[in-house]
Image: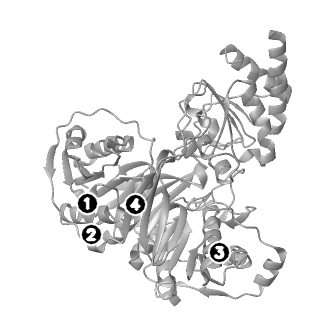
Amino acid sequence: MNIVVCVKHVPDVSEIEVKVDPVKKDIDKSGLVFDINEWDDYAVEEALRIKEKFGGTVTVVTIGDESADSTLRKCLAKGADNAIRVTDPRIASWDPLVIAKILYKVVKDIHYDLILTGVQASDDGYSVVGQALAEMLGIPHATLVKKIEIDGGIVRVNRELEGGLEEIIELSLPALLTIQTGINEPRYVSIMGVRKAMRKEIKILNLDDLGLAREAVKEASPIEMVELYVPPVERKAEIITGSVDEVASKIVEIIKSRGLV
Amino acid sequence: MMGEIQVLVEHRLGELRDITFEMLTKACELSEKTSSKVVSIILGKNVKEKAEKLSKYSDEVLVVDDDRLEYYNSDVYQMTLEKIVKERKPWLLMIAHTSYGIELAPSLAVSLNAPIVTDCIDLNVEDGKLMVIRQVYGGKLYAKIHVKKTDPAILTIRQGVVQPKELEKHGKINVLKPSIDLEAVKKKFIEYVAPAVGEVDITSADVIVAIGRGIKDKSNIPLAEELARLLGGVLACSRPIVDKGWLPQDRQVGSSGKTVKPKLYIALGISGAFQHILGMKNSQLIIAINKDPNAPIFNVSHYGVVEDLFKVVPTLIEKIKELKKQAT
């Protein structure tokens, strides 16, 4: 079973204030810590487990500048066999169909049975690239996947619907699945593994290599990023301030006044 | 930009889902500005009677009633919609950003060679230009995007962001019979799996103490549990806690879990992703404790504490114990 996993190198912004750069089309990336997109981490883990069960190879692909190599190395350290990175400053990176087109050019000549990627990326949260890539490749896809069973040429998956409901669907291989968080418990990387991965080659490609120098550039995209901005404050909460003791007393007072204690 | 705005109706297990009316409300607003016609499209089996209700919200209702559309299959939806769109040439097609819409919209965009922007929280036409707003970086920033190509543009719309209005249109109902070729379909619906029934029903609790990523470790859960117990409430959580396997799925609050409306909801270390907020925003009293002052949870809470929960919660527990002691 040969598996391709599409991953993204993203900043962790969970507990920090995100600033917009002066041009207002991107964020100010200084001082941010980057790592593999959380959903993609689950996809890589799932790919490795399938490889461990059925044999085959895992190839990880990303689009990004050289800082994204750390994410690819992490995947290699976990057990991926090959890594490919597409890099080009001309890419219309906010257009998910452009990203899918680039991945299509990379993946179409690789021998694969299964393509996995995360349901979405934590930065732009489109949930588009995987499905679009599958359509370009002419293979079936399933999104929001929480369970995978492979039996011969068929993959049976549980998809997460709303309100705790799931549906089971079957797809013929080759297929593309977008992986939901919680499907497995991603492994940690050993120091030995990282050291070994430092020696593995990462194949680098640009838009010219892929024949996309006209199609995938910013000017060609029908989607234009006008502006990135901090949303208007709509804070509703009355912030309780003071020492920890004062804060706790105030909370008790509030819930007591409502007869809740 | 005159012409047609199409809205794909979302329904499941015989019910029209709320997002349908949210999208139609938005579509009507845009149609007035652009002299467009709002056309809703419903695909399914035995859906004709649903068309009556939809006609109040649309200038035209297109119905495809076919046994092969009994269960949702994005491949079958895609081939059906592709034909309708190619024939009717709308300038805008709206689809729900749900488990169904996500499965369908991107591949439909590829097959129609249409641009797509997903999870939109607002859309507008400014000087004849289609502008959409979406959240990025977990809602910490908004992106304004100009969709330059509208033949058509495909947008998926986030649930719960448009206040649906009652409309009084009398759209004409048209039944279509596009050919459906199941030969080309490479996926198959097998069955639904209902959520497992747990020991605690969080939807019936008066008091909920909910934990998120900020609880840091499984070993800290008893702290939150004690607070819940003292208040006669139950423990619930946001998605990451279930993903880590620290609490069962029936404790998850949010769009992929449960919707709750307790008298008191205490959010501990929950940042407030919109999926979570959808499940708890109608609670009567919401108190959030989070050390990130920019956490979106403070946008829906009545009271907020910007502080480390591990400092506040133990003190809070002591104070409640004291109060209870005085009472007895």
The answer to whether residue A8 shows anywhere in this view is no
CB under 8 Å between callouts 1 and 2? yes
The residue that mark 1 highlights is: B68
Q: Dividing the picture into quarters, in which one does residue B112 lie?
A: bottom left
Three-letter code, disc 4: Ile
- Compare residues B243 and A59 and report the one nearer the observer: B243
Characterize the local packing of mark 4: few (<14), some (14-19) or many (20 or more) Cα atoms within 10 angstroms: some
Foreground mark, 3 or 4?
A: 4
- Give the mark toward the camera: 4 or 2: 4
Q: Mark 1 vs mark 2: same chain?
A: yes
Sequence-earlier tag: 4 or 2 = 2
- First along the sequence among labels 1 and 2: 1
Rendering quarter of residue B209: top right
> What chain letter is assigned to the residue under label 2?
B
Q: How far apart are the alpha carbons under marks 3 and 4?
A: 27 Å
**Whole-percent x and y of residue B287?**
67, 30
The residue positioned 26% from the left and 46% from the top of the image is B31
Q: Position of residue B58 (x, y in %)?
A: 23, 43
Q: Amino acid at mark 3?
A: Leu
Viewport quadrant of the N terminus of chain A: bottom right
Residue at x-position 60% and y-position 43%: B252
Q: Are marks 3 and 1 on the same chain?
A: no
Q: Identify the residue position indicated by label 2 in the image.
A: B182
